[in-house]
Image: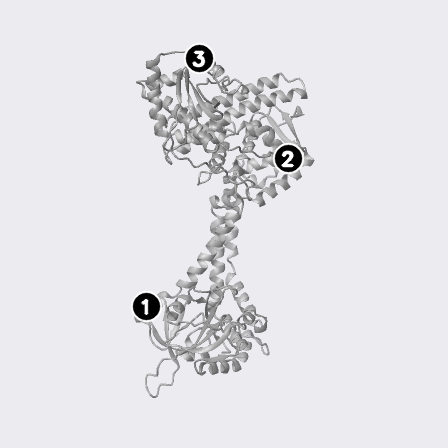
Amino acid sequence: MAGKRQHYVPRFLQRGFLAEPEGPTDESERTWLHRLGASARRVGIGDVGVEDWFYSRKGAPGEVTLDDAITEFEKSFSRGVKDLRESTPGTMIEPELAARTVVHLVMRTAHLRKTMSSGMTSVFAEIGALFTDPARLAGLFGVNNPMLSLAVTEAIKDSARQLVPVGFPEAFSERLLTFIVREYGDDLAGQMVAMLSPLLSGFLEGLGAKVRESHNGLVAKRLEDHGWVKLLSEFSWSVEEGVDLILPDAVALSRASDAPLEALLFTGGADVTVVLLPLAHDRILVGCRDAVEVVDLATFNAEAAASCQGFFVAPRSHEAEGLAAMIGSGPAKALNEAISEAVADAEKVRSLAPGEFEPACPHEFQQEEFSYRVTLHDFGDEILAKEYADILQTVVGTLSRDIPLHDLDGFTIAADYNDALAKLDRGDPDLPHVTSGALAYGLGVAMPVTVVREGKRKEHLVLAASIAEGWTSDDPELRGMCLHTLVKMLAGIANTARFSQELSFKPDAIGRELHLAVARSPSAYWSAKQAAFVWPDEGAIYADLVMDSFEHAKDAVAEARSRMSGPNDVLETFHVAREAVSAVLGHAADWIGHRDGLAEDQPFDGADLPGRLAAHGLGRWITLLGRDLAACYTEEGALDLSVVTTLSRHVERLLWSLGVYCWAEGEDVRCTVSDQPFVPADVHGLVEHDSAEVLSHSSGELSTGARV
C-alpha cells in the first residue's frame, strides 16, 4: 500500500469478493464495482477504494508516514483477516480479535472521512441558514417571544450594571434595554445577519484539510485506546455463512434493536446490538450483544447498499436488483435528519425559560338550558321590550352553541346609562354601586356587571338605549356596529366563565403597582377576536379609540404634572397616568383582537394604527403587544399565566411615553416624572453603539422623583 496510491478499503478485504476469472489463463484480481447513477463494471481491485495521498504525502528520507505505518501493521493484520474468511461457518472468534479487526477496518475508510466532511459541511450549512435568516435568528434570541433568551437577558443585565456609574438606576435601565431589544429585535437581527454573513463563508475555508487531519488522528490512534474496541470486545463473535453478499464502502454495519442496518459509527455505542463485517461473498463476521440472538441476513445487501457513501463491490453485477440506486440513501438521510433535528432543538430551548406557572385550562362546558331577563330601565313599553328580547334570544341562542353563556343574568337597556349602572341590583349589599369607566374622550355604552343571584356569581349586561336601537336600524353600518358591541360583550362574559377559577400570583414590586392596569387586556383581546366577524370595519373605531385615549393620557398627565409643586405630588400624577394607560391598553387589546379575528391578510379599516402610533414612538410597541397578547392563549385554548403575569411591562412602556418612569428599589417602587417622554431613537447601527448613548438619546432628563 505504500506509495502515492493509498487504499482506504484494503485489497486483502476485497479479495473475498473477486469475480470469476474470464478464462483459465485470467489471473487478474477483479471485482464488480457499483456506483450510484452508473452501470456496474468489472474493475481491478487495485483501482477500487483508493485515492492519491489519501493518508499522507511522500515523506522525507527516513520519515515514517502514516501510510507507511498502516502498511507495516497490515502485513500481519491481513493474514488474520484471511484466516477469518477461511473459517468454517459457526466458528467462535475471540472477542478482542474481532473487535480490533472491525474497528481498524472501519476507522481507515473514506466512508468515515466523507461522513465527517459531509457532517461538518451540513452543520455549517444549517448554522449558516440560521445566522443568515433574520427571522430565525430573532427566534433564537427570543425577541419574537414573550421571554428573551437567557443569553440576551444576561447581556442586558451586564449592560445595565455598566450604566450605574453614569446615573441610570440598574433596575430601570435593565427594563428599558429589554424593551428596546424586544421592540427592535427584527432590526437588530437583520444587522447581525449583515455582520455575520461575510464571516460564515470563511469558516468553510480549509475544512477539507481539517477533516483529513481529524480522520488521520483517528487512524493513527492505538486500537487499545479506541472506546469501540472495548465496547465490541464484550460482544459474542462468530463467522457465519452468507449468500451472494456485497462489500459496502462502510465495511462494517451495525444496528440498534430492530432498526435497519447502518454504518457502524452511525449507531450509538450504548444502543448497538448487532455488528456485521462481510469477509467474503459467502462469509460474514457477526457480533451480538446477546449471545443467543439469531441474525437474519435476508435484507443485508439492500441495507448495506443504502449505508454506502460512494460504492460497493461484489463478485457479480447486481444491476437487476437495483441495489446501486440505493447508494447514499442511508447515511445522507440519517445525517441530515440528525443535524436538522439538533439545530431545531437548539432553536427550541434557546430562549424561553421554564414557565413559573402552569397554564390555566378553560372549563369544559356542555350546552345547557339557562334563562335571563331583559329590562328596559327608563323608556319603552312591553312591545319594544319583546322586540329587543327576540333579537337577544336569537343572538344569545346562536352564540351559546360555541361559547359558555350560562352565567348571563340578564340585560338592562337604559336611556340614562349611568343611572342604570348606579341603580342595578347587584344581589349583595356589600358590593359597591357601579359607575362608567369611560374617560373624558369617550362615552360609556355597554358594561358587564358582576351580580349575585341565589348565592351564585352571574354577569348582568347594561347597555345604552342607542345600542339597542341600532339593532333594528335600516342603516347597515349602524346595525353592524351595534350588533358587534353586543357580541363582544357576550364574548367577554363567556371568557369570564371559561376561567372562573380564582387566578392569583405574587407579583414583584413593579407588578404590584401596575398589573391591574393591564389585567383585563387578555379578555378584551379574546372577546374582540371572537366578535370580529360581525363587523370587520369596527377596526377603524378601535384604532381611533387608541389614538384618542393616548392623546387624552398625554393631556391628563401634562395637567397633573403642571399641578405638581414637589416630590410629594408624584403619587397623584402616577395614578392619573396609570388610569389613562389602562384605557389605552384596553383599546389596543380590542384593536389587536379584532385584527387577529379576521382572516389572515384581510384588509380592514383601522389597519394603519401602527403607522399612526409611530409618530409617538409606539408603532413597534403595538406589534409587540400583539405578539404578547396572542401568546397569552395556548393552541389548546389555555391561559398561559407565565405570559399574562409579564404584561405589566406594557404599562411601564406606555408610562415612559408619557414621561413617567418607575423602577424597583427593593420592595418599593421609585417613580420619576419628567416633561421628556421616551421616544426610541433610530436603532439603525444600534449594535455598534453603547447602551449609555442609546439611553441618553432616548429618555431625556429624569427629574422630580419620589417613592410610590
Figure colour scheme: one colour
Residue 302 location (% of width, % of height) = 37, 68
Badge 1 or badge 3: first in the primary sequence = 1
Residue nearest the viewer, comparing 74 with 590: 590
Residue 518 location (% of width, % of height) = 53, 29
Q: Check disc 2 and give the amino acid type.
A: Ala
Q: CA distance from mark 3 to mark 2?
A: 48 Å
- Residue 691 vs residue 190: left or right? right
Q: Check disc 1 and give the amino acid type.
A: Gly
- Residue at the far right in the pictured view: 165
The residue tagged 1 is 322
The residue tagged 2 is 171
Tell me if mark 3 has few (under 14), some (14-19) or many (20+) residues whose alpha carbon lies within 10 angstroms of its own.
some
The residue tagged 3 is 416
Q: CA distance from mark 1 to mark 3?
A: 86 Å
Q: Which residue is drawn at the image coordinates 60% and 40% (left, top)?
A: 156
- Residue 632 vs residue 564: left or right? left
Label 2's element?
helix
Q: Check disc 3 and give the amino acid type.
A: Asp
Above or below: residue 255 compared with residue 469: below
